[in-house]
Amino acid sequence: MAASDEMAQKDEDDMKDEKQAEKEYADFEARVKRTIYIDHLSPLVTSQVIKASLAQCANVVNTEFIENYTIEYEIPAAALVEVDNVSQAQAAVDLMNNFPFMLGGMPRPVRAAFAKPEMFPDRPRKPGLKIEFSWVKQGDPGYDGMNKLKGLMRRQEAENMALIKNQLEEEKELAAQQQETLVANSNKYDMLENLVNNGEITKLAQHYKVKLGDD
């Protein structure tokens, strides 16, 4: 095969690859639009819990939990939740932001928003985008600027860890308050049930001249 023929074949293959990349990225963009991002999820939340919680407004197609392995603490999880279409995604975002997410009978401070392409670890290459990288060492152009940026990132990481510690303390306090409320409500129901079973409720109604429904 002549060199010109090989070049023409290579150009044709490159064009096919680019068209395939465009199709894959278009499909990916459509998936992003019908996916929502949810954070502040309890570690107890599973894909089935999310599917059941959104069943009234959306059909969950796929749930992908986002793990953060760089943080030593067990923080509330986040998830990317794909539904059937954009309108269902909007309904799911409105539902989670306007109503409490219940877990074990207690509300959780869950937040929801539309997903963004950079949230997906499996996102395809954007057509026409070329990424170049190189190692920068002392004395190279741009080294000082990159070194300052590295220091800034470390400072931001320290600030982020401080915020996470504060968030975990607030989560612990919230969990304790919720557990206390749950126990108090349970004790009230137990007391009412005992009053009904031992007949004390009738005596109290007669004493306070209150007519019970069964009278």
Image (cartoon, rainbow, N blue to C red):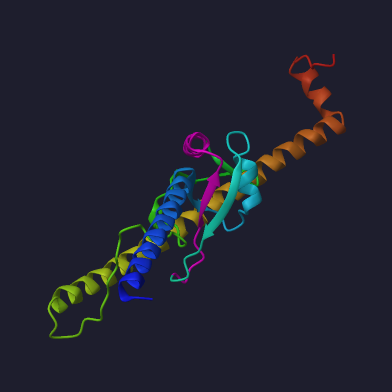
- Residue 180 appears anywhere in the view: no
Vertical side of 77 occupied by 2: above or below: below
Vertical side of 140 occupied by 82: above or below: above
Quadrant (top left/top right/bottom left/bottom right) for the N terminus: bottom left
Quadrant (top left/top right/bottom left/bottom right) for the C terminus: top right
Q: Nearer the viewer, residue 138 or 21?
A: 21
- Counting from the top left corner in percent of width and height, residue 106 is at 60, 44
- Counting from the top left corner in percent of width and height, residue 107 is at 56, 43
Is 92 within the magenta?
yes
Q: Is residue 146 left or right of residue 129?
A: left
- Counting from the top left corner in percent of width and height, residue 110 is at 49, 46
Q: Nearer the viewer, residue 152 or 201?
A: 152
Kindly identify the residue that appears in the image at 37 percent across and 59 percent down.
15
Q: How many marks?
A: 0
Vertical side of 135 occupied by 81: above or below: above
Most extreme residue toward the front is: 2
Q: Nearer the viewer, residue 62 or 20?
A: 20
Kindly identify the residue that appears in the image at 38 percent across and 67 percent down.
9
Kindly identify the residue that appears in the image at 27 percent across and 72 percent down.
132
Most extreme residue toward the bottom is: 138
Range covered by the magenta-colored residues: 71-98
